[in-house]
């Protein structure tokens, strides 16, 4: 039987969803703070660029 509280008590998939949310927030926040130097930002944070492009694509589809 799992211990009460902590990660063992969380619904399946919750921590993965929270990690995705945090990564998305970090990417967009980083972009917002560094958008005046976009080329340098892209070089420094390529994984954030992937997230930013996906969000931009979803916004453009609306």
Image (tube, rainbow, N blue to C red):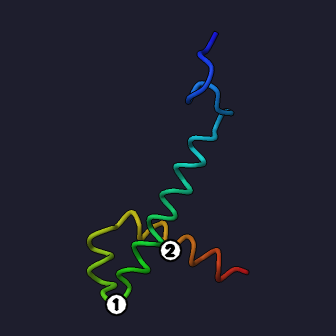
Between discs 2 and 1, the one toward the N terminus: 1
- The part of the image, by quadrant, that contains residue 16 is top right
Q: Secondary structure under badge 1?
A: helix
The label shown at residue 53 is 2
Q: Quadrant of the C terminus?
A: bottom right
Q: Nearer the viewer, mark 2 or mark 1?
A: 1
Taking the view exactly as shown, the residue that stands out farthest to the bottom is 36
Pick whichever, 8 or 55, lies toward us.
8
Crowdedness of circle 2 by 10 Å Cα count: few (<14), some, many (20+)? few
CA–CA distance in space, label 2 to label 1: 17 Å
Q: Quadrant of the N terminus?
A: top right
- At x 39%, y 72%, the residue is 30
Q: Position of residue 37 (x, y in %)?
A: 30, 87
Instruction: Give the residue number, with chain letter if any, for mark 1.
Output: 36
- At x 59%, y 24%, the residue is 8
Q: Is residue 39 left or right of residue 51?
A: left
Residue 56 in the image: above or below residue 18 = below
Q: Is residue 62 left or right of residue 52?
A: right
Taking the view exactly as shown, the residue that stands out farthest to the right is 62
Q: Secondary structure under badge 2?
A: helix
Q: Position of residue 47 (x, y in %)?
A: 39, 63
Crowdedness of circle 1 by 10 Å Cα count: few (<14), some, many (20+)? few
- At x 51%, y 56%, the residue is 22
Pick whichever, 1 or 35, lies toward us.
1
């Amino acid at each position: 039987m799992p211990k009460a509280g902590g990660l063992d008590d969380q619904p399946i998939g919750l921590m993965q969803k929270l990690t995705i949310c945090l990564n998305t927030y970090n990417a967009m926040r980083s972009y917002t703070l560094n958008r005046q130097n976009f080329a340098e930002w892209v070089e420094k944070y390529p994984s954030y660029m992937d997230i930013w492009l996906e969000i931009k694509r979803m916004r453009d589809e609306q």
